[in-house]
Image (cartoon, coloured by chain):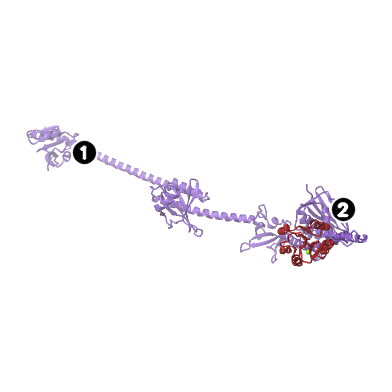
């Protein structure tokens, strides 16, 4: 087993991807980034991750569609991210399966790192 | 057979002497008649026993032509003659018989005279009696005929009264009940039924106690349109339904007076006691009544029909939301509905009642022609007049006034809503597009700032970046609020609203001096914040657009006893007096094409009024305008 914590960041916003890479830049973490939903899904299908952060509005597959295609992710912890705060009532099934929802802009970036630290296996 | 001989004297006319004469009689009554007051009977042989001499009789003298008395024993016993002469005494009696006879004759003569007199009297009496009888008969007959006449008149009167009574009865139930009562009184029927027949059913309608009952039969057992006595099977059928024995049924078809209205057959069915037969008079009486029933039913049907259509028309007329009036070509109101005017307005002119004018409305369809649309102004509203000519000679017109003020308002509202929702969508998309990089910037800055080895100057730069990003985020948030479709009434201070609105106007007021003088922090108003924010936005934008650069704009707020007041005071060009009246009208604008839609002030006024407020202004050309928004804060 890889002793490092493995994270996958799927977001079409380069600044967000860069912020996550910077946040988890230590030797304890292995961060993989994907620029859109499709790329993210391909990577996720091939590799195991401990944490996956998925943006919702992206070209190609959106965040929910990535979840639908993956459908099962075992012990992996998943957080959705979006600047969109509209109606989520038809996403209840997925919201129950995921571990959290991060509205953009993030209120507390350091808090994300703390959450990962406290939930690593 | 000759039983009797009588000897009688007859007076000879020639010598005035009496001649003795024999006569033979077949019967005693003949004999006794002949004998007159004295009965003289000469018996030649023994007569039969049968003739009985009546006890009451004139004196009886019997002469026996035989000497053997024993031969006559029986008859003598029976007859008991007053004088009995034997054959040998015959000569002796001639004399006094003659005497007797003369006496008898005289008496008889006298009696005869008396008798004649009596006869005549009797005859007279008889005649008189007959006459009397005749008179009595005549009298009786006349009386009878009088009575009949009277009865006839009474029956006619009764019928007429009945007809009059009928006219007060409107429902079929009342009508039928009247007929039933009348028929019972006249002993024409014990029960009556109204029979109704259409293509599928036969229905008998009648009273059971006080209830009107309908009995439906699936089969048709009445086919002809003639008066018809129904068979006993019909009575039996009915009997099984009404639960009592049913007498003889006679159907009288109701004449269809209004053929074009009659789609079904109606008839009156008379039920008689089984023993009673209908006389000729009864028949014609019933027919007379049936005719009346038919007429009354038709009349009621027509009346109901007319009343209903009149009522319906009245309802439609009055219920119409648009004012409607029928007017003459001289603008006189003939009829109008409630929305035209609540009062009755006889002989008044339409323009005075509806528009409160002294002269004809400028765009009245009766005076102006060939306009695309006829629009008149009445009590601050705009009506489009739909004019319909009622008659050929163009004397009367039906005018419908369609209030297009609301239509205009609605159009404005619609456009504004459309605008808002499209702005809303754009704002939503923009927010998303901006939030993503903002989120990245803020996240990165935060991460960078966490590095304790940073140079102080770099750290200061990063903090500035962070501040700018936060400001940008706020602007987007305000924009989202501003166009939000969720219009919940909230308790909020005017200051909060102005705080949220001003950042959106930065572009506008940057070139002007802005003075804020707000003193309404202590009172909250209950409004939909975005709407009032739009009003504030509009007022400030209008003010800025009317001013040259460098002039100052003042926002002043204060409390009155019941309201929060905001005054937006500019140093602009002011509003010419001629335009002031139209300022709040939809689509009115003084701005160049493309700069304004003209919706701003009219909608702003509506928004403020929605919360019980007022939007007013005062303006002087060359000096500027002050717009004043007042919103009550309530208790
Ligand atoms: Mg995105």
- Tag 1 secondary structure: helix
The picture's colour for chain A is red
Task: Please identify which colour was used for chain B in the image.
Answer: purple
Residue B553 visible within the image: yes
- Quadrant of the image occupied by residue B110: top left
Q: Which residue is mark 2?
A: B517
Residue B414 pos. (x, y %): 73, 61
Mark 2 secondary-structure assignment: strand
Number of numbered markers: 2
Foreground of the two, B238 or B328: B238
Q: Chain of mark 1?
A: B
Q: Is residue A41 above or below residue B70?
A: below
Q: Quadrant of ligand 1?
A: bottom right
Q: Position of residue B440 (x, y in %)?
A: 83, 62
Residue B255 in the figure: left or right of residue B73 = right
Vertical placement of residue B50 versus A70, above or below: above
How packed mark 2 is, by other alpha carbons closer than 10 Å (few <14, some 14-19, many 20 or more), is: few
Task: Kindly identify the residue that appears in the image at 50 percent across and 52 percent down.
Answer: B296
Q: Which residue is mark 1?
A: B112
Q: Nearer the viewer, residue A41 or B295?
A: A41
3D distance between C-alphas at marks 2 and 1: 159 Å
Place residue B62 in its image quadrant.
top left
N-terminal of the two: label 2 or label 1?
A: 1
């Amino acid at each position: 087993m890889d002793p490092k914590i493995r994270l996958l960041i799927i977001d079409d916003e380069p600044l967000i991807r860069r912020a996550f890479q910077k946040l988890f830049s230590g030797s304890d973490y292995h961060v993989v980034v994907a620029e859109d939903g499709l790329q993210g899904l391909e990577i996720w299908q091939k590799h195991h991750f401990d944490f996956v952060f998925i943006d919702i509005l992206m070209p190609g597959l959106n965040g929910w569609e990535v979840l639908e295609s993956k459908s099962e992710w075992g012990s992996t912890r998943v957080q959705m991210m979006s600047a969109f705060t509209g109606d989520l009532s038809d996403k209840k099934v997925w919201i129950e399966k995921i571990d959290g929802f991060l509205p953009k802009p993030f209120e507390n970036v350091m808090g994300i790192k703390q959450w990962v630290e406290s939930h690593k296996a | 057979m000759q039983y009797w001989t009588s000897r009688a004297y007859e007076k000879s006319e020639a010598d005035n002497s009496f001649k003795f004469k024999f006569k033979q009689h077949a019967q005693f009554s003949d004999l006794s008649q002949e004998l007159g007051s004295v009965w003289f009977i000469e018996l030649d042989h023994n007569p039969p026993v049968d003739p009985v001499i009546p006890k009451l009789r004139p004196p009886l003298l019997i002469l026996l032509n035989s000497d053997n008395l024993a031969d006559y024993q029986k008859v003598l016993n029976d007859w008991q003659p007053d004088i009995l002469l034997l054959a040998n005494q015959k000569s002796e009696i001639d004399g006094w018989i003659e005497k007797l006879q003369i006496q008898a004759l005289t008496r008889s003569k006298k009696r005869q005279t008396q008798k004649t007199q009596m006869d005549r009297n009797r005859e007279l009496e008889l005649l008189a009696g007959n006459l009397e009888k005749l008179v009595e008969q005549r009298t009786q007959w006349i009386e009878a005929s009088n009575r009949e006449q009277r009865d006839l008149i009474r029956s006619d009167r009764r019928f007429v009264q009945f007809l009059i009574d009928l006219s007060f009865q409107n429902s079929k139930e009342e009508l039928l009940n009247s007929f039933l009562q009348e028929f019972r009184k006249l002993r024409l029927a014990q029960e009556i039924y109204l029979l109704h027949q259409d293509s599928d059913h036969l229905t008998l309608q009648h009273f059971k106690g006080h209830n009107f009952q309908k009995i439906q039969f699936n089969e048709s057992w009445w086919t002809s349109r003639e008066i018809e006595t129904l068979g006993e099977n019909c009575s039996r059928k009915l009997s099984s339904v009404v639960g009592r024995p049913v007498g003889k049924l006679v159907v009288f078809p109701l004449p269809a007076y209004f053929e074009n209205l009659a789609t079904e057959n109606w008839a009156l069915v008379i039920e008689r006691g089984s023993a009673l037969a209908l006389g000729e008079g009864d028949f014609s009486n019933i027919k007379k009544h049936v005719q009346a029933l038919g007429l009354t039913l038709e009349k009621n049907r027509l009346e109901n029909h007319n009343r209903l259509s009149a009522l319906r028309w009245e309802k439609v007329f009055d219920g119409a939301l648009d004012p409607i009036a029928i007017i003459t070509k001289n603008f006189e109101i003939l009829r109008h509905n409630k929305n035209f005017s609540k009062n009755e307005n006889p002989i008044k002119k339409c323009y005075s009642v509806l528009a409160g004018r002294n002269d004809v409305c400028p765009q009245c369809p009766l005076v102006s022609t060939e306009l695309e649309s006829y629009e008149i102004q009445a009590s601050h509203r705009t009506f489009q007049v739909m004019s319909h000519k009622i008659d050929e000679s163009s004397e009367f017109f039906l005018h419908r006034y369609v209030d297009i003020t609301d239509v205009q308002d609605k159009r404005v509202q619609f456009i504004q809503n459309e605008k808002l929702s499209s702005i809303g969508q754009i704002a939503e998309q923009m927010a998303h597009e901006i939030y993503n990089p903002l989120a990245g910037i803020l996240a990165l800055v935060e991460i960078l700032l966490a590095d304790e080895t940073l140079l102080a100057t770099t750290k200061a730069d990063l903090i500035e970046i962070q501040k700018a990003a936060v400001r940008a985020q706020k602007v987007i948030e305000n924009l989202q609020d501003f166009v939000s479709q969720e219009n919940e009434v909230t308790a909020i201070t005017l200051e909060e609203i102005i705080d949220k609105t001003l950042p959106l106007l930065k572009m506008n007021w940057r070139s002007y001096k802005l003075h804020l003088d707000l003193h309404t922090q202590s009172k909250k108003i209950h409004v939909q914040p975005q709407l009032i924010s739009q009003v504030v936005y509009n007022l400030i934008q209008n003010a800025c657009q009317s001013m040259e650069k460098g002039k100052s704009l003042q926002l002043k707020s204060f409390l009155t006893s019941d309201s929060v007041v905001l005054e937006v005071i500019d140093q602009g060009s002011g509003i010419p007096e001629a335009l002031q009246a139209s300022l709040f009208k939809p689509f009115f604008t003084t701005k160049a094409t493309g700069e304004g839609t003209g919706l701003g002030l009219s909608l702003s006024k509506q928004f403020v009024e929605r919360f019980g407020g007022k939007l007013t202004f005062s303006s002087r050309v060359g000096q500027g305008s002050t717009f004043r928004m007042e919103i009550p804060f309530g208790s």
